[in-house]
Image: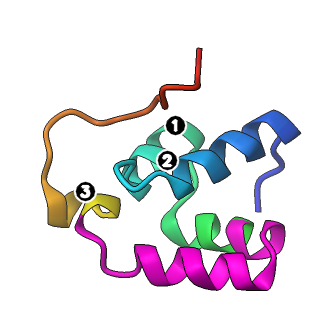
Amino acid sequence: MKEFTEKQLDRIIEMAWEDRTSFEAIKIQFDINQDEVIKIMRSTLKNKSFRIWRKRTKGRKTKHRKINDISPMRFRSKNQK
């Protein structure tokens, strides 16, 4: 797995938590696939938080660009400068 700075890991986790940011957008920005995002979330979050996140994202159309097929890709949250 790639090595990320603390700031990059925080951003990956933030993007993964956002419902409207797809895994494909995370891949484009950080060059990691969905499985790697899941591994990061599993190792970083508490068990209960991970289960809640995984349950929420599993099969969610907005997390999968191919299913959702939205044209603009979202990279930035409102909090990011």
Q: Earlier in the sequence, mark 1 or mark 3?
A: 1
Residue sitting at x 81%, y 66%: 44
Check the picture and name the quadrant holding the C terminus: top right
Position of residue 76 relative to residue 50, above or below, is above
User: Which stretch is magenta?
Assistant: 41-61
Residue 40 image position (x, y, % from top left):
72, 65
Q: Which residue is mark 2?
A: 26
Quote the CA–CA distance across marks 1 and 3.
Answer: 14 Å
Relative side of 11 to 22, left or right: right
Residue sitting at x 29%, y 36%: 73
Residue 45 image position (x, y, % from top left):
78, 70
Q: Which residue is mark 1?
A: 29
Query: What's the amino acid at mark 1?
Result: Gln
| Quarter of the figure with residue 59 | bottom left
Q: Which residue is mark 3?
A: 65
* Foreground residue among 72 and 33: 72
Residue sitting at x 47%, y 51%: 18
| Dominant SS in magenta | helix
